[in-house]
Each structure stands twice: as C-alpha cells, then as structure tokens.
Image (cartoon, coloured by chain):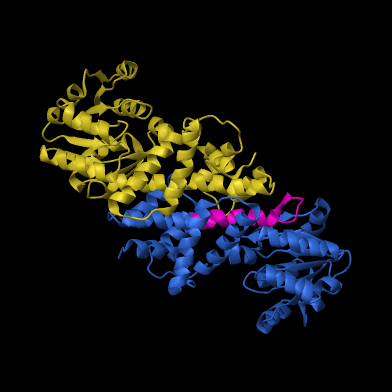
Chain colours: A yellow, B blue
Amino acid sequence: MTRVAFVGLGAMGLPMATNLLARGFIVSGYDLSSKALDSLESSGGHRAGSAAEAATEADVLILMVVNAAQAEAVLFEGGALDALRTDGVVALMATCPPAAVEAIGERVREAGRRMIDSPVSGGVAGAKAATLTIMAAGTRDTFDRVKPVFDALGDKVFHVGERLGQGAMVKTVNQLLCGVHIAVVAEAFALATKVGVDLKILLEIMSGSAASSWMLKDRGPRMLEPDPEVTSAVDIFVKDLGIVLDAGRDTKAALPLAAAAHQMFLAASGRGEGAADDSQVIRSYLTLNGSK
Amino acid sequence: MTRVAFVGLGAMGLPMATNLLARGFIVSGYDLSSKALDSLESSGGHRAGSAAEAATEADVLILMVVNAAQAEAVLFEGGALDALRTDGVVALMATCPPAAVEAIGERVREAGRRMIDSPVSGGVAGAKAATLTIMAAGTRDTFDRVKPVFDALGDKVFHVGERLGQGAMVKTVNQLLCGVHIAVVAEAFALATKVGVDLKILLEIMSGSAASSWMLKDRGPRMLEPDPEVTSAVDIFVKDLGIVLDAGRDTKAALPLAAAAHQMFLAASGRGEGAADDSQVIRSYLTLNGSK
C-alpha cells in the first residue's frame, strides 16, 4: 500500500487527492484552508497539522501548490522534505518555471531524496474525472515508482524526459500554445468587427476549417458574449505566459508571439479585468482599436 | 443550363472547372497555360482564346486568378466584363485584400454588372473533392443566383454578409489564424528544443490537449522532418499574411500577432527558403536562436 502526502488541496488538489483515496491509496493531506482539510477527511483522508506531518513516512509527496516559491517553502522551510522517507519521491505537480524546477530538484537530490517533475493539464474538470494529462520528467526508475499514483489521477501519463525541468517545459509549451491561440482568436475577431462581419457565422466557418483550434471552439463562443461566466481568468494567463517568457529568458529563446500575446492579457489585467474570463482578452483589442 | 466562364485554371482552378463540367455546367475556360486548356478540353470544357471570349454570353464569370491585380486586368483591360451578359455575375473567388475587392466591386457595379465576393478555403484537395469552404458576400439575390455553381465546388457554402469585401475579410481572418497557428507551433517547438524535450512526445501530448489546433496536427509532424514534401509553400503565407496586414492597415486595426508571424515567414523567404514547405518556418526560429 502506497502512502501519499498531498500538500495543496485547492480547486485542483482536492479532487486529485479524493481520486487517490477512491483508488485505495492512504492519503495524508495538508492545506492552509481547514475547509479543504474537512473535505479530505470526509473522503477518508488523514488531516495533517503541517506539511511535515503529512510527509512523515510517506512514499510519495505530491505538491499541488500555487507556484515554485510555495513548493520551496513547503520542502525546505516547512520541513516536509526531511520528514519524507529516505526512499520517498517528491512529485512536483504545480505549474512552475522549468529553471525553478531544476533548482528545486537539485536541492532535493542534495537532501538524498528523488523528485519527479510532473505538471498536469486538463483543468478542474480533468482533476475531478481523473483524466488529467501528466507530463513527467525524471529518471525512468523514479517515473516507474510513481506511475501507479499518476494513473489514479490522469489517463494520459507521459514520461517526457530524464531531466528535471523537461516536464515543466512541456507544460510551459502547452501554455504558450494555449495563450497565443486565445489571443489570436481575439485579434482575428477584432479585425472582422471592423468591417461588420457576423462573428457567429465567422466562428462557425473557422471552427470547421484549417483555422480551427481547441481554444477557438472553446473560447470563441465566449468572446461573443459581453460578460461570460468565468471558466479560467485573464490573470491565469498573465501568470502562465509570464512563466513562458521566463523560460524563454532562462534558455535564451526568442518568443515573439508569446511576448505579444502576454501584453494583451497584461493590459486587460491592468484595466482591472484580471478576474474576467480569459476570452475577454478580446477587450484589449477592442479597446486598443477603439471599437465599440 | 448555366454557362460558366472560368478564368485561371491553375492548381485550384482546373479541378474546380472540372467539377463544374461533371455537374453538367457549360464551361468555357481561359488561362495563359495551353496545357491547362488542354486538360479542360479533355474534360469536356470549351477552350477560349481570351478571357473576353470565355466570358461572352456567360451567366457567371469565375475569377480564380493569382491576385487582385490579375482580376482587374482580366475584367477591365482584357474586356471580360464588357463581354459578360448584362445580367451576368462576376464571382471573384481568388484570395484578395478586402479593400481591393470593394474597389473592384464598385467598378463592376458602374459597368452595370453584379459581383459576388467569394473566396475559398480547403486547398487543392478541397478543390478536387468539391469540398471547398466558400465565404460569399454580396446581395442575397446575387448569392442565390450563383449558389448552384458554388454547390458544385464546395460543401460548406456560407453567405457571410451583404457587403462586398466581407467575404474577403472572412478569408483574411482564416489566413490570419492559419498563419499564426503555424508560426506559434514553430515557436513552441523551438523553445522545447532548447532543453532537449523529445518533440515527437511533445507533439503527441499537444495534439490531445487544449493546446491543439488543426495546424498543429497537420504541420507539426512536418516540422520534425528536415526537408518535408511541400504541401503549401512558405511564400504562400508571405503573401497571405501580407494581405492580412494590408487589411489591418486599410481598416486601421492593430494586428500584433499576425505582424510578428509574418516576419518569420518573410525571413524564411529572404533566406531563399520561400519554396520550402510552410512548416519550415521553424527554421526561422532555429536560425534566430542559433539552435542546431
């Protein structure tokens, strides 16, 4: 029986931990929110008083925290790493910049533990349905060790490379494509608006042509609404395209499209619309062009 | 029985004209290439000695020429417009800038004829299989008149607006999305290359995630080949993103992503790679970054 420590029981983490419990794993969880700990407990999980307590005697320590700084705080300041079994594995599943993941991995190695760099995509829906995509990098041995845990969380589990940071880079590339795809739909619709083309017909045509993308079909309809329900906020892409650009700086890669797209999300956030649905990046274009 | 004059029997035009013949239309064609005229004749079409001869007594004059300048030359200098029946319709199906289409339409109207702005997408494969997408703008009456002809050429025939130029704008938007989608895949792959991620696994993951696009799935595999077969050349997007940017200038719309993508295709062409497959825009990124 594998004992899993789960730190970070937010919108993604809680359903992930619940799926582990449903598959028979022993889960000890920690989060700052006592409400999240209540939920975990009611699903059969153990409520830990700290990240270090959760990690004690665990085989796998999953970090589903907000960012790299939180992961570092949990591991190195909170004492979770030292509490972990010496043959235990740290699974860093939060979205972090590749260079930060490399650096964290180095410190984990120095402390005599192993790490698997394993961010996810698929959102809250994927977390709940256990259909996440998991992009894992680390030694083959470490990957094989943690694979049963990943299989309980997602149905598309990939070993993308042996080097820590490569998983984070795949996730980074994923966000680069997603963010630019949303922004370019906004750019295209804003252009069409200038000559009064019916955007509904335009969307229908584009959805069935070589111009289609997953984001066009998902965010396109919401761009036609003035104030759609928030599925994912503008500020998520302010952060994630920020990570993309950091990865470009760290590796010295030119990213002209990602940089331009980031500006449009950033400006939306600057106008006070960071909590709006990310489809509303179209307002940056409409504002810039002086349309309606 | 509808008599169709077909000017421009290239890679797209010839199979389109052949489909019209197969559906029972009377087709009189013209092209500078006598080989193309031979092909048309062997399929049962009439070989005209000039565009004006092809247009004589035609109900519909289809222009499938290279650009707006050629369309103008055929209509106004070659005498095709005057040769057309007074109740005849000009179907401008070539990809042209929206503003040029508007201007041509104005001259056609002054000459007492009607025009339908009706560019296509779907490429040579769509032209052959009669599965083109046709984005038609013009009065409802004119659209209805020409609809049977369009139905012989494509299976996704849309009336996108009443105003000439709106069809061209939908096609322009289509090309904006297609061009940026190709370039952003190249940008993403070039970034991943920097940390040695296996691009085949990356492509597999992205194809099944929210990062997917039609172009990712189509051009992505060809980006991994050093010298793939040419399905569509770099120079096509040098031209088409050029039209996109012209449309942005004409309507005064900011297009930061399209402009950045255009630079990468342009530079590829400048390095003498304009005839390469458009997936090879990735070489612009690799060259820029000094990768391999």
Whether residue B47 appears in this view of the structure is: no
Span colored in magenta: B157-180
Give the x, y percent position of residue A236: 42, 36
Q: Main secondary structure of the magenta part?
A: helix
Judging depth in this view, the residue of A52 and B201 nearest the camera is A52
Whether residue A285 appears in this view of the structure is: yes
Judging depth in this view, the residue of B68 and A34 nearest the camera is B68
Q: Is residue B263 left or right of residue A291?
A: left
**Residue at screen point 32% across, 19% down:** A33
Residue B43 part of the magenta segment: no
Give the x, y percent position of residue A138: 22, 46
Quarter holding the N terminus of chain B is bottom right
Judging depth in this view, the residue of B47 and B274 nearest the camera is B274
Q: Is residue A244 left or right of residue A206?
A: left
Quarter holding the C terminus of chain B is bottom left
Quarter occupied by residue B200? bottom left
Give the x, y percent position of residue B235: 52, 69
Total marks placed: 0
Residue B166 part of the magenta segment: yes
Quarter occupied by residue B290? bottom left
**Residue at screen point 71% across, 56% down:** B165
Q: Is residue A60 left or right of residue B216?
A: left
Give the x, y percent position of residue A241: 40, 43
Up the image or down, B67 lies above or below A193; here it is: below
Quarter occupied by residue B98? bottom right
Up the image or down, A116 lies above or below B9; here it is: above
**Residue at screen point 21% across, 17% down:** A49
**Residue at screen point 76% across, 52% down:** B163
